[in-house]
Image (spheres, helix red, strand yellow):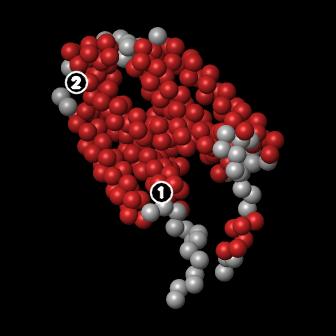
Amino acid sequence: MVTRTVVGAHYGLRGWLAQRISAVVMAVYTIVLVVALAAIRPADYATWKTLFGHGLMRVATLLFIASVLLHAWVGMRDILMDYIKPTGLRLALHVTVILLLAGYAGWAVQILWRT
Amino acid sequence: MPDASLKKKRPLWYDLNLLHLPLPGLVSILHRISGALLFFGLVWFLFLLDMSLASEQGYARFARYVSQPLVKLALLVLLWAYLHHFCAGIRYLFLDIDKGVDLAAARATSGLVLAVSLALTAILGWVLLW
């Protein structure tokens, strides 16, 4: 029989670190976006499209969305681990969240790289 | 080996009224609630971004859509969720490097997070939505 109490020992370090790195990426992007919006003040389709069509902005937005999805995964995983105790249901919800977020990633690429 | 019975000595908080929580506790649970709200809001954000960037007509539909009062209200709630999550998150990054961990500072920065995120919601909400 295994009597070891399963606590600690770095199991959560990767998620913890991913949460912080993605947070910093999102914070920087948010400030850049607010400054860009304040400077450009897009009020029509042409300006709006130009803003997100710019090569750098496209890549920055993709990095932001990738950070959002990673951050959302770690956060939702933690919430589900705290409140959903039955293993089967928890697994099903974890898988649902992963599939949703993976789908959003594909959708975001389509939105940003559509001509 | 860690003693499992030690768990029983931890302080427990049975008062479920969020407003009775100490300030850092309130910021903490709001961080979780705002995060969950943002997760559910993701699909709507992508829908809005998709519509606004799709075409000239899509942009016009987007502009009409976001001018509806109920949509504005929902966007305002999500804006607050984003800003609270942002401010509380920055506070946690400082706590990670042991800045502001004593009780007085923890209380003061919690109040600051609540106030700044509400003020920013009012300012950005006014500028972006009205």
Q: Circle 1 is placed at which residue position?
A: A84
Residue B118 lies, with reference to residue A62, above or below; the image says: above
Q: Are marks 2 and 1 in contact (CB under 8 Å)?
A: no
Which of the 4 quarters of the picture holds residue A44?
top left
| Disc 1 residue type (three-letter) | Ile
Which class describes the residues within 10 Å of circle 1: few (<14), some (14-19), or many (20+)? few
| Residue sitting at x 39%, y 45% | A69
Residue B56 lies, with reference to residue B35, above or below; the image says: above
Task: Say which chain tag 1 marks.
Answer: A
Which mark, residue B54? 2
| Disc 2 residue type (three-letter) | Ala
**Residue A19 visible in rendering:** yes
Which mark, residue B10? none
| Residue sitting at x 72%, y 71% | B6
Which of the 4 quarters of the picture holds residue B45?
top left
| Residue at the outermost bottom position | A1
Q: Where is residue B124 in the image (x, y as percent from the top left)?
A: 52, 19
Q: Left or right: where does residue B46 sit relative to residue A23?
A: left
